[in-house]
Amino acid sequence: MEPTAYLESLRPAGSKRSSKRDLIVNVFLRQEGHLTADDLFDLIRREDQRISRATVYRTLQWMVDAGIARKVDFDEGRFRFEHSYRHPRHFHLICKTCNRSFEFLSSDIEALIEEVAAARNFTARQSVLQIHGTCEPCRTGRPAAAEQGATDALFARDALRIAIATERSGLDFYTRAARLTRDARGRRVFEKLAGEEKEHLATLERRYRELLLPDPQLESQPTFLFFKGAANGLFSAGAEQLAAGVNDRQALMIGIRCERGSHKFFKRYGEKFEDSEGKRIFLEFADEERAHLDLLIREYRGLVERQRRRAGRQAPARKRRREAAAL
Ligand SMILES: [Zn+2]
Ligand SMILES: [Zn+2]
């Protein structure tokens, strides 16, 4: 959704267009980073001298209530405001020398917060993590390599990187599983999944290149999204388990565990993010993993059934042998 359409959708039906408010909102949405109310007022005054400070303050509060802006407190004795529209919830590094702030996201921290809250029966509404200190340019005197760009693009870049890493380890896992599975049908399923991972991988890599095309600088910007215990870790662990020597059923079961973990991870975090390209990448990826999971579960049930029938046919033969031996 474009910002204007988004604003239209927020406006109560029949309410009059407020051109002052629209101007303030549009100026705000054009900025990156964290503005104080006075920063915004100065920007507005450059465009329209007639807008009062009180109107700017009121509109900021309206934006917070409407979910367009988020209020952040960097412990400077005044609030700052940042977008929440197409801007994922994130954590901050704050330089106490130049007062600049840098954003990052971490699923590991989110998972830890959830774990702590759940263990203490606490319903978490909001969590704020700030790391105060000195940024690299202030510490070394060297200018920053690049200003942090739009987090929407950074988020999409890192979401694609994570999806690509997961596909790569998934491909490795299925290729190995196909090699060691003895059951012909089970092997074909693993080969099919390896083929799909390869295809998805190519699609994701194309999308990654397309994202960088208009902004080659994007590639070298610092990491925005930190994932240590990410879904690709699951598949690497799964591949290790395969190497330890497993039977067909165990191989399928390991695949099921990896896909389920991966699906849950991408869905859970995808749903957390506000509307953005990164969110879409996560949710699309979650759907693909879900399809793989369903296929593996079907195959696992089929294999168990085939093995049961085979055992059933063998039972009478064993019984005959036992009876023959007893003679
Ligand atoms: Zn600094
Ligand atoms: Zn921020």
Image: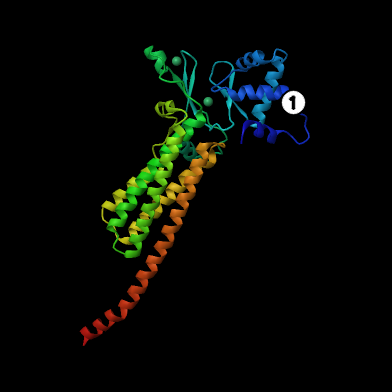
Residue 296 place in picture, x, y as percent: 41, 58
| Extreme residue in the bottom direction | 327
Residue visible at 66% across and 15% down in the picture: 47
Crowding around mark 1 (Cα neighbors within 10 Å: few <14, some 14 to 19, many 20+) is few
Q: Is mark 1 within 8 Å of ligand 2?
A: no
Residue 142 picture quarter: top left
Which quadrant of the rendered structure holds the C terminus? bottom left
Judge from the rendering whether residue 62 lies leftward or rightward of residue 229; answer left or right.
right
Residue 247 place in picture, x, y as percent: 29, 60
The secondary structure type at the circle numbered 1 is loop
Residue 224 place in picture, x, y as percent: 45, 30
Label 1 amino acid? Ser
Q: Along the line of sight, which residue is nearer the eye, 232 or 241?
A: 232
Is 43 located above or below residue 124 in the figure? Answer: above
| Residue 118 visible in the picture | no
| Residue 13 visible in the picture | yes
Residue 159 place in picture, x, y as percent: 45, 37
Residue of label 1: 18
Which quadrant of the rendered structure holds the N terminus? top right
Is 14 located above or below residue 233 in the figure? Answer: above
Judge from the rendering whether residue 238 lies leftward or rightward of residue 81; answer left or right.
left
Residue visible at 59% across and 23% down in the picture: 30
Residue 168 picture quarter: top left
Is 20 located above or below residue 159 in the figure? Answer: above
Residue visible at 31% across and 52% down in the picture: 175
Residue 248 picture quarter: bottom left
Count numbered badges in the picture. Answer: 1
